[in-house]
Structures are given as structure tokens and as C-alpha cells.
Amino acid sequence: MRYGMVIDLKRCVGCYGCQIACKAENGTPPGVLWARVLKLEYGEYPARRVSLPVLCMHCEDPPCEKACPTGATVKRPDGIVYVDTAKCIGCRYCMMACPYQSRYFNDKVREYFPGKGLTPYEKLKYKDHPVGVVTKCHFCRHRVDQGLDPACVANCMAKARYFGDLNDPDSEVSRLIRIRRGYQLHPDLGTDPSVYYLPP
Amino acid sequence: MAEDVWVPTVCMMCYNECGIKVRRVDGVVAKIEGNPDTPYGRGKLCPKGAAGIMTLYDPYRIKSPLRRTNPDKGIGVDPKWETISWDEALDLIEERLDRIRRDDPRKLVLAGSALLGDGLLIDRAFAAAFGTPNLYMSGAGVHCGQAEHTLCYHLHASWNTFPDYEYCDYLMLFGCNCGFSAYYTTTAMCQKSGDARARGMKVVVVDPVCNTAAEKADEWLPIRPGTDGALALAMLHVLLNELNLYDAEHLKKNTNGPYLVGSNGCYMRDVATGKPLVWDKQSDRPKSFDDPSIGDFALEGHFKLNDRSCTPAFGQLKEHILRYTPEAVEDITTVPAATTRRIASEFGAAARIGSKIVIQGKELPYRPVAAVYFSGGQWHKHAYLSALAISLLNHVLGATDVPGGALGANPVCLGHPGTGRPHTTPEAGPDGLMVARDWRGAPRLPYPPNEVMPPQSLDLIELFPVAVHSSLPTVVTLQDTHKWRIPYQPEAMIIVGSNLLMSMGNPETQMKAFGRIPFVVSFNLSTNETTDALADLVLPDACYLERLDIMHAKILNSRQPPGTEEWAIQIKQPVVPHAPGVRDVNRVFIELAERLGIQSDLNVVLNNYLGLRPPYALSPDKKYDIEQIMDNYYQHLFGPEHNLNWFKQHGILKWPKKIEEAYWRPFVKVRTPIYFEHFIRAGQDVKEMAHELGIVWDTSDYQAMPEWKPCPAHQVKGNGWDFYAIYYKVGPHTFTWTVQNPWLNEVGEGDPRIYQVSLNEDTANRHGIKDGDFIRIESIAGYQITGRAVLSRGIHPEVVAIAGNFGRWSAGIPLARGKGALTCELHPTDLEYMDMPSGNLDLCVKVKVSKA
């Protein structure tokens, strides 16, 4: 079992639904974007644009895990890489090690309405976001453990995201990668990401 | 944990009203998800919908009524709000309204918001009960699809059109992002568009900016703003005159294409019956259009009738567009002639004229092409003529309300199997042309044309006989009611949910208009630019997650996904209670009606709008709350077993859609116009009325056939007026109000373009403007705004593009303040820049750009 995600850039409309669905599910603080969307432009006029949704790549060989001095970054047997915040000392070596800029440091309690205190929703959710630790996308492991897709996958209104077992050649994700020639971002870095992209 | 529940309801972060389920944990909203049970989104949400929690919990929401203590009003003025009680606020309103009602009820103006969707019904019902015609949609403001609505009711008996993503093979979008993160039913259409593209549907997008649809398109055709109609005319010319490619059977049977038209542009009519005549090729003589003995309708040719020469309407159209060769149009649109010709030919071929498809055992015409438009077709001076040109691409190919084509939003509904309600189907009206059947509570219908009358309403709707609604003229007439022969001077305005100062064109012009109304009340979640500049009282409304609203069945005629998906009626219900100082707008209007002694009138109006009949009709002498009204309405529609409690538990009632509902064209015997003969007469009526009133009113666009005419912006050349400034919509924001939502604001701040001013890289370089420069944009009207430049190769060289209704300044919305810019500020906001038949404001304006 190796959980992975496939993002179909042909279907993705760059709406930022994944970024907000992640917020709504995980209640991450301001500036912490476990899921986000990059906007690129290439070619001469009339140039084309591409929206590139990114998140933690859940690398098979995660450099963040190696960099962590306390064992706070854990790669589960099913491939999900997460931070055990109880063990994290906030040294942020992992942030430097991550080539995909997928990690965030909670330096202090940040309010979405600065100076107005936490909203009831933030109060509810910030229990999961202690200060002084590094956090990142964990493929919504609480959902996955209940048999649900990660929130960004479940919510995508373009149906551009797929989640499944990369080790199962018959899974939808494996099939899509094979048929549509899915690729990883920066495979040259040798981390073997579990997030694949299908060409636009 | 005492409580952890999911409540089904409806999103109102925009006007699309997608189905959501909301998780409530110990009284706190913990998550909003799409409801997988509803065709309004199938469990998916756009970013706005998922971000609703942060609007609900915005600490800047007001929690008690506010009274202005600063007598000065105006842009940038501090109103110096003081908190007052609801009793004080309602007493003040009652006193004013009571006086106005005794004097002349028309002196009350109600301004609603597109964002309130069908909840606006209480606003509209109150206006009718009070006796004022002055109610208008200001939330969408000048960004509404008025030309589209007018044409869609004529051509599809609907508020709007969709491409049939289930079967379409070739889609053209003219300044429209349907299925790509904007337009109606976004969450459902994005999924369908993805499916269609995955199975190989080709998408061609015509847009000055590479917005989301253009980003995903197989081909993006950057076009000079305001010239989409010219491109469509050139495509029509190629189809009809070069390729001879059109659906003759459809035109003969389902349109007024065969109706004989004389040299005056009007139908040739049977002397005895007055019915339009056609030429029967078989008997070689004229017959009434509905004569059952007609062997074959002539679509072309020149005929003589009583010494008068005449031609079938379709033949007229063919000849009329001869001058729009792709070469002639290239200079107008900047789209190369060869591209136009190729696209037209591909579009025509993809229509598979003559082909059939069998769906659920029914054989239907199969026309898998659609041209759908929004801003490109209508945010321009000659909106009606441009929108008509684009619409005809579907209609000459028969790609209308059949599988694969352009579909009206569900004009045929045969009702729930248990009750037969709601029931609506278009019918043949005057001259055999289609009359949309009213979904009660919808705005008025444009055909047959409404009677032209002296102005009674500030929006001069009486001078728009073929429009669905009007709004912009209010900004003009309020400045000088005498000039426009309005027989009264408004004394009070109640604004519900909108921020009209930021959406109805230039704010200074609006101040000259709305500033003349001495007493202004605004229901809103927070104070905003409109309240700060204009309002005397602000009333704290409940958020959509705290309110039970009227969910009118007319939603089926605009937001219900088209095609074969099941029918669904949802409930919009509260998930959490509102703060004690907040009051739901529905409750306040009902209370005001009681205080003013018009409660029985309100009940009568609601009975009419909701179609309520005994035993569910509201009794005139009883006060109902919104729960009782909705309980009656649901039972009226779906029987006693489906009452309000049933809806509260289940959230949604669904039933299968029949093929003759989804693809109704072959099953409903009505003709739709390809030649808008009645516009000629309507224009004459308006002209005569304008003459009688002594007002200047241009009626030259009331034409039967499409044409491209330059917008005012196209006529401005040289002297540094090098750019067209245009407004465009972006998926993560709805007009002004979502900018204050911190999650969506974070999107705006992170995106390279949403809060910036986009310019073509080459042109900007020639003007010495670099990426990130702070720039000044000055419009031909003398207005100017500033913004941060972002250079792009994905934008037409002559264009400055500014997203959304940003550039906010009110102290009440600190997160939104100072973000982005407001294109509206650049717009000359008067009738010179308005499309006279439909009421759309021209949203392309010539500007100078320089470093600030």
C-alpha cells in the first residue's frame, strides 16, 4: 500500500477550491496553505496559462524525515508523511530540507481577523495547530483512516483529483498515471513524490 | 461532546445556491461541504462556498442597528454611527414609511441583491404590498446579464442558457466561464465541463483576457473588447453565405425564418386574420404560417404579394449579413480572417445537421455544438445586437434545446409526480412565437412586448418593452426626476444586502443620484461603502447560515442544472442561531408590514408570487412568519407529506426529469424568432413615447436583425487613449462582499492577478511600465483609479483588465479595504453608454495608463 494523489491538469480549472477545502477541513492558521495553487504563464502572446495545484508530495524518500532530529516527521507504512507535533521542537530543519516548500511553521497564534481574537471556528480548530511546531499536509489522514478521500479530492468541483494506492496497478490512480502519462514534479530531486500530475 | 450533526441547506456565497451540508459541533459551525445528494453541485463546492464559515464568524458583523449621527453624506465621509435599539430603528422607519405610504407609495425605493437569490422575494413582495414599483436588483449591478436574459426568454423561455455538456462536442464561449469557475450553477457545470473535455469536446474561447475558460480551452481567441458580435456575424456569414450550412428543417418548423418580410421590415400578414404569411413552395403561393396544407416553406427567394416585394425572414438575414466577411471583420475584432473562417466551418460541421440520437427510447435531433456568452455578448453599448448575433449561431444550426446544443435553463417542467407541481411549459403566443410561461415571482417576460407607458418607475422599465428588467436608469433618473417625467420625488430607500455604490457604475455619479434620497436604510452583515456614504440606518441582518429563506421553485428556471439530471428543490434553513441583536430580514419586513397595516396586502402578494391556493393560501387577516409561509409553500408544491419539517430533515426533494423536459424542443409546438420583427414596432412605440415626453431616447438599436456597431470606446483614438479598460469576474470572489472573507482574501493576495491590474507585456513595455509598477488609469470620462501592474502575455495588447468589485474603502470591512481596484469607477454612467433595448451598461472604456 502506498497512498498517492493524481491531479489532472486538463480538468483543473484553477479555482482554489482545494486551498479552501483544506482550510475548511483542517482549519489551518493564516498563511499556512497545505494546499495551494500556483499560476504560471508560458509562451509568447497569446500565451497560455496553467494553474498548478500543489501540496505536500508525500515523497517515498522524504528528505524532511531524514532532516528531523526528533523523529517528529513520520512516514507511515502506507506512505503518508505527517508531523507528530508532540515530538516537534520547531527547529525547522525539515523546512529547509523540503524541496517543494510544503511545510509551515506556526510561530505564534495568528488570528484571521487580526486583533479581534479567534473566531469560534478557529478556537475549535487551533487545538490541532499548536504554536512552535512545523505542520504540513497529511493527506487528511484522519479522513483516509475512515475510508474517505482527502478533503481537496472530495471537494474538487472539476473532479481533477484522484486518491488511491500507487502500488496497486489496477487502482484508478495507477491506471491514470499509466494511460495519461502522469508525471511527478522535479523527479530529478530523487525524492519519488507520491503526487502525480496529468498533462493539461 | 453533546452534539455533532450535519444540516442540509443552501449556499449563498453567490447567487447560484448550490446544495451544502453544514457540520455543527456543540453549536459551532465546524465545516461546510457540498451536499452529495443534490444535483446543485453533487457534493462539490467552489472556494467561496467552502469559505462561508469565515463570513458567518466575521467579528466585524454588526450586532445592533446603527444610526448615522453625522449629517454629511458622501464618499469617504465618516458616518459616526451610534448604536440604537431595534424598537428605535423600527419606529423611525415606520414613521417615514407611514407618511410616504399615505402620500405616494412610489416614493419608496427598494434595492435588493442578486446575492439574496430567491430570498429577495420578501423584498419584492413588500414593495408590491406597499405599492411602489421601485424595486431593482443592484447587487450584480451593471454586471448583470440583461441582454442575455432578454434573448433567453425569447429563444429558450429561460433566464439563461447552458451548453449541453452531456452531449456537446464543440463549444464556443464568448466572454463566459460557464463550466470553468464562473456563471450559473458553477459547481455542477465545472464537473460536467470536465467530463465533456475528458471525452474530447473542443472548446474555443473568445475573450480579451486568458481567464479560466481560455486557460483550459483548446483554442483561445483574444479579441478586442466589444467586438464579439462582429466575430459572430462573420461566422454566421461563413455558415450561411459561404458554406450554405444551416438546419433548414428546424428553421422551417421551429422558427419564424419562413415568415415573409416586406420592404419595411415587417411581416406580410393575411388581410383577414392578421397572421404572418409564408410562401408555400409546393403550391407556389402565400399561406398563413400555421396553414396545415403547407407543403414546403420557402426560406429564401423574392416574392411579390399585392405588388409588394417580400422575402422570407431567413433570406433577409442571409442578405443582411453579406457585408460581414471575415476579412471585413478582421480589422474590427483583430481575429485573423482565416481563423474566423476555420472556426465557423468547424462549428458548422460539428453540428451534424440532420443527425439524430436516441436517448431513453426517444429519437431526437442531435446538434452537438453550442455558443454561449456572457460579458463578451452583452457588457457593451450594443449588447442586444451582439448577443443576438451570437445566439443565432445556435439557432441557424438547430442547436437549441436538443441534445448537444445550447439549452435554456429548464423552461419545461411537468411537475413532481405526486402533485404535478411546479408545472410550466412555453406556449405559442402572438404570431405563433414562443411565450415563456411565468415561473411565478420571476421578473416580467419580454414577449409579447410589454406596453410602453409614461414612466412610473425610476428604472424607466415602461420604456423597455422587450427587456426582462431594468436597473441602471435609476442612477440617471434620480439625478433629475422632472427631466425624466417621473411624477414624484423619492423620499426613502431600503437596501437589502447590496453594496450598490460599488456595483452600479461610477460611485460619484451614484452619489449625485442616491444622495438625493433623504432617508436610506440598509440591511447588511456589516457596514460598507454604501452604508457609509448614504445610509441613515443600518440594520444587522442574519447570515445565510442563520436564516430560513423563501426557496422559490423558479430556481429550476435558472440554477437547476440542464440536461437529464433529476429535478431538485432544496431548503435554505438556519444551522446556528444569530446573535440576539441581529434580526432576519424576512422577519423585519413582515413586522414592518404589520406596523404599516399592509400585512393583508403582503399575504395577498405572497399568495400570488408563490401560487398558493386553499388550503395553503395565506389568510389576509393573519400574520405569518417565514416558517409558516414556507410550510404552506412546500405543501402546496409537493403535498402534505412534504411539509417544512420534512424538508428540514431531508434537505432536498428530487424526482426524475423526463426526456421531453430535458430536451423539450421537439415536443413543444412553438416557434422562436430568428428575426425580431416585434422589436421594430416596440422601438417605434418607445420613440413615440419619448417624443411625447420630450426626452432624448435613442431607439435605433430596436432592429429585427443583428448588426455590429462600434461602442463609444471604439470611436476614441489617439492622444494616448491607448487601452480599453475592462472588468472581469474571478472564481474566488463574488462582487464586493467576499473580499472581507479572510480565506478568500488570502486567495486574492496570493494570486498574481486578482488584486492587480493586468496589462499586455509588450504594450506595457512600450509605455515604460514594468511588472509591479504602481499605475494610474484615467478614463475618457475624467475618472481615475490606481493599481499595481502585472504584465502578461495572456491578455490582448489593447486591454487593461481589472478583476472584481474591489478597491473598497469602508472602515467597516478592514480586511477588504485597500485591495485591488474598482473598474466601475472609470465608467461614464449614463444612457449614452447603455444598450437601449436591454439596459446593459457598456463596460469597456478607453483609458490612458501611466506610472503613478
Image (spheres, rainbow, N blue to C red):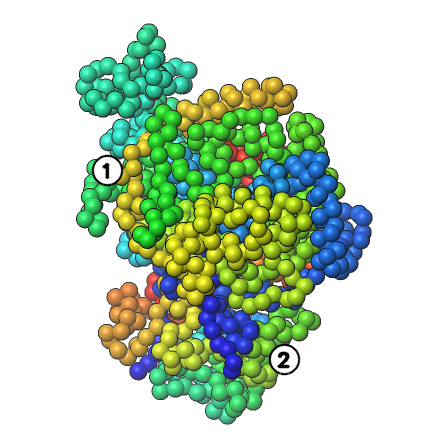
Identify the residue position indicated by label 1 in the image: B353
Give left or right: position of B449 versus A10: right
| Residue in the foreground of this view, choosing between B260 and B113 | B113
Which residue is at 48% across, 71% downward? Answer: B23
Residue at disc 2, secondary structure: loop
Residue at disc 1, secondary structure: loop
**Circles 1 and 2 in contact, beta carbons < 8 Å:** no
Coordinates of residue B754 in the picture (x, y in percent) = 55, 56
| Residue in the foreground of this view, choosing between B575 and B20 | B575
Q: Amino acid at mark 2?
A: Lys
Can you tell which quarter of the image residue B193 is in? Answer: bottom left
Any part of residue B757 in sight: no
Coordinates of residue B581 in the picture (x, y in percent) = 68, 63
Which residue is at 60% across, 19% downward? Answer: B691
Can you tell which quarter of the image residue B693 is in? Answer: top right
Q: Amino acid at mark 1?
A: Ile
Coordinates of residue A3 in the picture (x, y in percent) = 35, 78
Q: Chain of mark 1?
A: B
Coordinates of residue B814 in the picture (x, y in percent) = 67, 61
Which residue is at 32% across, 49% downward? Answer: B563
Mark 1 Cα-neighbour bin, 10 Å: few <14, some 14–19, many ≥20: many
Instruction: Count up the numbered dots.
Output: 2
Which label sits on residue A108? 2
Which residue is at 66% across, 74% downward? Answer: A117
Q: Chain of mark 2?
A: A
Give left or right: position of B561 versus B721: left
| Residue in the foreground of this view, choosing between B844 and B32 | B32
